[in-house]
């Protein structure tokens, strides 16, 4: 295998204390390992600067509120939005549920339609099914192209003025296929529909600018971006957020409460009831600084090079079937003929290679591919060619064992 100029400079393993020498962690699409700056920010948040936000008048709380809101501004700058458009949620799942309940739940009526695609994660399917059932809307599903991308030509044909919302993965968590999001936004807007992008797998892998993409809502999870679990982001166009009722009631989200009537705070506070995940937000800020410090363009090139190496080497093994397009973003799904993906993952684990095996919360996609599950290797800034070599050796061992 050749060491390319793109892969060599991004060997940042030393930043990740939880990855021991010799362990190939290839499950970043599930969750990313944490770099020291994120761990340090979380430690500092609890060990040095901890206090509540938005309430206390004492200095420590004012300082924490300042840090919390600075993180919101940082996230906004990171994805090209405005600070007041950033809603902190538990993760992408909560962000999608919020839009489903607060936007779709109030804007859709019986006979309206929602457009999803075959490759969506369950968290970009089930919330829409729940709201569709409640309001009497229908769900349509855009098929995939032969090389496993969302088929935008088919989408153009399918869209009607009954479609009020299109919700698509920016990058597939199984196939790594990247959506032409700008084109998807044009098509959705041409019929008056809104576009929500599930950016869980995109934000850690490519520079994202929501204004340039032209979408209406964008969600992602902190823990896949090298940040903590329990914190994620919903970005929404301010006019849309401002016209949405709150998701949950409680402290912090109000303007004035009386038993006769309650008025709500403007966005984003309206959608952040209760004491937030304060230190999680600080950790997310550190994660954004970390990836921006490296540059998303470099990360993207690095992962693309690893994908190329992995796909070329795996394709050379006769019994391996590869899924997804060749230019997949940091994620390679595959199957070994005659071997269940769980057995593949177990044997790889014996050789210190951690991959994911299963349906990846995308059962409709598994049905489309005609498999119960796939084996999936996904890459990050801490991976290098040594990890691809370990993966390929492990898969060769699988084929020897199952002969
Ligand atoms: N969408 C995609 C594409 C994902 O990969 C994931 C996580 N596997 C989710 C949504 C859900 O993210 P979370 O569980 O962090 O809310």
Image: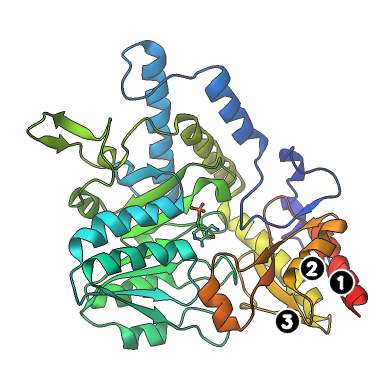
Q: In the picture, residue 84 is in which quadrant?
A: top left
Q: How far apart are marks 1 and 2 (CA)?
A: 8 Å
Q: Which residue carries the number 1 mark? A: 398
Residue 321 tag number: 3
Q: Is mark 1 within 8 Å of ligand 1?
A: no
Mark 3 crowdedness (10 Å alpha carbons): few <14, some 14-19, many ≥20: some
Q: Distance between the residues labelled 1 and 3?
A: 14 Å
Please determine whether, in this image, residue 323 is positioned above or below residue 358.
Answer: below
Q: Is mark 3 within 8 Å of ligand 1?
A: no
Quadrant that contains the C terminus: bottom right
Mark 2 crowdedness (10 Å alpha carbons): few <14, some 14-19, many ≥20: some
Q: What element carries label 2?
A: helix
Residue contact between numbered discs 2 and 3, judged by CB atoms under 8 Å = no
**If you read the primary sequence from the N terminus, does the residue marked by circle 1 or circle 2 appear first?**
2
Q: Percent x, y for residue 236?
A: 31, 53
**Residue 214 seen:** no
Quadrant that contains the N terminus: bottom right
């Amino acid at each position: 295998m050749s060491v390319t100029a793109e892969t060599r400079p991004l060997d940042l393993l030393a930043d990740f204390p939880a990855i021991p020498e010799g362990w190939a962690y290839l499950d970043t699409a599930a969750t990313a390992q944490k770099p020291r700056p994120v761990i340090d920010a979380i430690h500092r948040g609890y060990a040095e600067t901890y206090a509540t936000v938005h309430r206390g008048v004492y200095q420590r709380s004012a300082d924490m509120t300042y840090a919390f809101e600075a993180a919101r501004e940082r996230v906004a700058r990171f994805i090209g939005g405005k600070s007041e458009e950033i809603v902190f949620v538990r993760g992408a799942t909560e962000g999608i549920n919020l839009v489903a309940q607060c936007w779709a739940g109030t804007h859709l009526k019986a006979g309206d339609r929602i457009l999803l695609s075959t490759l969506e994660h369950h968290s970009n399917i089930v919330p829409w099914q729940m709201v569709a059932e409640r309001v009497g809307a229908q769900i349509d599903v855009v098929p995939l192209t032969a090389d496993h991308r969302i088929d935008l030509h088919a989408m153009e044909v399918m869209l009607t003025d009954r479609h009020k919302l299109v919700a698509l993965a920016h990058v597939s968590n199984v196939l790594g296929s990247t959506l032409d999001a700008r084109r998807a936004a044009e098509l959705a807007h041409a019929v008056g529909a809104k576009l929500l992008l599930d950016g869980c797998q995109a934000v850690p892998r490519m520079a994202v600018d929501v204004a340039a993409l032209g979408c209406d809502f964008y969600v992602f999870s902190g823990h896949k971006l090298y940040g903590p679990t329990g914190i994620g982001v919903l970005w929404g166009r301010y006019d849309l957020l401002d016209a949405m009722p709150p998701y949950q009631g409680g402290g912090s989200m109000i303007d004035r409460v009386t038993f006769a009537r309650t008025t709500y705070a403007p966005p984003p506070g309206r959608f952040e009831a209760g004491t937030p995940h304060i230190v999680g937000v600080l950790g997310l800020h550190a994660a954004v600084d970390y990836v921006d410090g490296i540059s998303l363009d470099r990360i993207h090139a690095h992962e693309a090079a690893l994908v190329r190496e992995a796909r070329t080497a795996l394709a050379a093994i006769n019994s391996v079937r590869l899924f997804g397009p060749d230019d997949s973003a940091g994620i390679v799904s595959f199957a070994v003929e005659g071997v269940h993906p769980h057995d593949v993952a177990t044997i790889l684990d014996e050789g210190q290679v951690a991959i994911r095996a299963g349906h990846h919360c995308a059962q409709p996609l598994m049905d489309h591919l005609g498999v119960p599950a796939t084996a999936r290797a996904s890459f990050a800034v801490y991976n290098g060619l040594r990890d691809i070599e370990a993966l390929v050796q492990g898969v060769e061992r699988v084929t020897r064992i199952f002969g």
